[in-house]
Amino acid sequence: MSKRARVLFMSGVSLMVLILIALLLPVPFVRMSPGPTFNVIGERDGKQMIEVSGTTTYPVTGDLRMVTVLESGGPRGGLSFITAIASWFNSEDAVVPRELVYPDDVSGDDVKSQQAAMFSSSETDAVGAAMVYLDEPTTQTVIVAAVNSDAPATGKLEPGDVIVAVNGAAIAETKQVSAMIQAQPVGTTFRFTIERNGKKQDVEVTSAANPENNKTPYIGIGVGVVLTPEFEVKFNVDGVGGPSAGLMLSMGLIDKLTPGDLAKGKDIAGTGTIRPDGTVGGIGGIRQKLAGASTAGAKLFLVPAGNCKEAQGHIPEGLTVTPVKTLTDGINAVEKWTAGLPVPACPVQT
């Protein structure tokens, strides 16, 4: 081989190496793709996904699937250029700039912790919604649902804290907390008696001026309620994050606690957040969840009404997608569909 040929050969090899490196370098994007589905009235790893003890349960058949989205890139790991390009041309995937999903200062551990907290909250709300639907007796407690960043309560109160009392006054309803804070001037110190990890303690938080209205005091928390039934409910759903399984967890629990058979052997999937009053909220990744449900074999999909428009044009053939606003809507839709009756449907892709 001549010297010129050797130079050209080495240059070509070097160029190929550089191209390969470029293709494998991480890019600042996040890919979302269809994830696995889980039958909430079935088993996972040898355990019932919903375990109930201390009350009567009933046999169930079929599938009530919660659906998931797989995420790569962003804080939890790099997304290569070549993978991003391949996903861009995959109709089931979505590739979006990282900054539209996560702030720059969020770490992978932060995301994992936040996702786990949201899922835990969805489990709690799923139980509460089921108990309200079934009119079962419960014990109500008020909890810290969220803490704003850089707020007076940051580092003092935590999501999941049970608010027992404020300044010695017992708390039974969420509105009591905001009313007490609003009744005092900015700069007032409040003594929160809370229960955290089974231990009671006092925490002092001093109110500040609300950034959106400097005449209004705030401490920067959101409060919610937990409705605890007179029996034990345990969800065996490890490794899944986010709030969007609430609807299906609640429906699965109702199915186990009531005579009859909700799914009647059919394959049904769905998604949506849930509140204790049964309100179903919107979610992200609907395109990927529809694809994952269809691949798993689902024939009916319950979608939050607010996501129905987003689902249009992405509904797989053979999958009926029906919008729901409440838990009752979801139960009614499944009962009608399994009986062979029509249900309201989002348009099917043509």
Image (cartoon, rainbow, N blue to C red):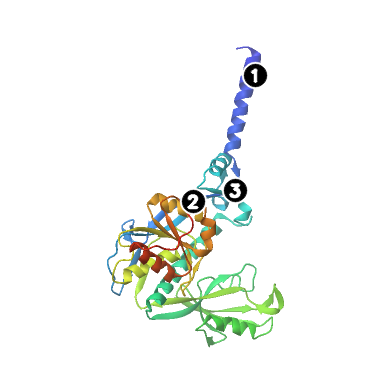
Q: Find the distance from the CA under tag 1 to the CA under tag 3.
A: 37 Å
Residue 349 image label? 2
Q: Quadrant of the N terminus?
A: top right
Secondary structure at numbered mark 3: strand
For marks 2 and 3, the one nearer the N-term is 3
Residue at figure coordinates x 62%, y 28% from the top left? 15
The residue carrying pointer 1 sits among few (fewer than 14), some (14 to 19) or many (20 or more) residues within 10 Å by Cα, namely few
| 127, 266: nearer the viewer | 266
Q: Find the distance from the CA under tag 1 to the CA under tag 2.
A: 55 Å
Are the residues tagged 2 and 3 within 8 Å (C-beta)?
no
- Residue 253, x across and y down, in percent: 36, 68
Q: Is residue 228 left or right of residue 152?
A: left
Residue 188 visible from this viewpoint = yes
Residue at image mark 1: 7
- Residue 240, x across and y down, in percent: 45, 58
- Total tally of numbered discs in the picture: 3
Placement of 102 over or under 154, stated as above or below: above
Secondary structure at numbered mark 1: helix
Secondary structure at numbered mark 2: loop
Residue 285 visible from this viewpoint = no
The residue carrying pointer 3 sits among few (fewer than 14), some (14 to 19) or many (20 or more) residues within 10 Å by Cα, namely many
Residue at image mark 3: 29
Pick out the residue farthest to the top. 2
Placement of 72 over or under 268, stated as above or below: above
- Residue 319, x across and y down, in percent: 42, 54
